[in-house]
Image: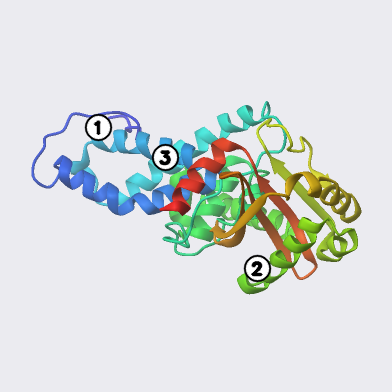
Amino acid sequence: MRDRDDSEPLDHTGDDRDSLERAMKDFVAARPQLFGIAYRMLGSAADAEDILQETWLRWQRADRSGIREPAAFLTTVTTRLAINSTQSARKRRETYVGPWLPEPVDTRADPQLGAERAEAVDLAVLLLLEKLNPRERAAYVLREAFDYPYERIAEILETGEPHTRQLVSRARKHLKAARREPVSDSAHRRLLETFLEAARTGTLTALEELLAEDVVSYADGGGMRGASRVPVAGRERVARYLAAFAPRFWPHSRVRWVEANGRPAVLVWREGHPVALLCADVSDRGIERLMWVMNPAKLAPYVAAVAD
């Protein structure tokens, strides 16, 4: 008998144990973790929800009578679907207008976003994970955020354990080389508060003192007017850029402190409408990355979440 692929539907009888009601309970119990995996893989809450919808459909069609660990089955399906979706998402982003940033999420209710550890939910980390191939990304997420054993990750990825260890090791090295150790949340907020004061006044020298030498500013507007279509890099260039648009951007704006992806962030409003979510990656050198989420399609779901 040939091995059955997870995606193949099978007829099954609906006894009490394998009823749709029990299937729903198992899915709901695993859902936070499934969403956490898909979101970290794709950097998009909307795409993660699409993955979970497909996982649920496959779970309904599966012969659940032979599945002893529903969470393990659901995790495998979700991870493999996310890997496939990551590959197609990269092609779509090749035509994305301007810098692409992950879609922010409100982590107040679930600071770890379904994980055993909060790793790989910070917006800066998700941005760096984009540089990894899909299998490296999956291995890193499962190991670092969800503490999956290497043997189990190897089964999910359909590879050997030694290769799985290599995938995680390469991912760790990439992140370590690309990102300095972040500061505490309290230090993060203090520096962001000081930055906000300097940015709103356009004080060039004050801005330069707060920025790391190789700072990069990303503005994800999805093609909207007013958002830079290329990243701005370097302390002096970023400071001049911020000072130049201060007179146009900050007057008549108000700000609200929020939490995004586990870190303090600033939501900027103008004339009753959200116009930007400012997130930062901060180390002991200062601000390493500025991430301006301005695309309305990404802002709207986040604003709706923090309004609840």
Quick one: quadrant of the N terminus? Answer: top left
Q: Where does label 1 land, which residue?
A: 61
Say which amino acid is labelled 1. Arg
Callout 1–callout 3 Cβ contact below 8 Å: no
Question: Is tag 1's residue or tag 3's residue first in the polypeptide sequence?
Answer: 3
Q: Where does label 2 land, which residue?
A: 189
Q: Is residue 130 left or right of residue 178?
A: left
Camera-side mark, 2 or 3: 2
Say which amino acid is labelled 3. Glu
Residue 285 against residue 279 in the figure, above or below:
below
The spot of residue 277 in percent (x, y) is 62, 50
Judged from the image, the secondary structure of the residue bearing numbered disc 1 is helix
Residue 254 against residue 8 in the figure, above or below:
below
Judged from the image, the secondary structure of the residue bearing numbered disc 2 is helix
- Marks 1 and 3 sit apart, C-alpha to C-alpha, by 19 Å
Crowdedness near tag 1: few (<14), some (14–19) or many (≥20) residues, C-alpha within 10 Å:
some
Label ID, residue 49: 3
Observer-nearest of 231 and 208 = 208
Crowdedness near tag 2: few (<14), some (14–19) or many (≥20) residues, C-alpha within 10 Å:
some
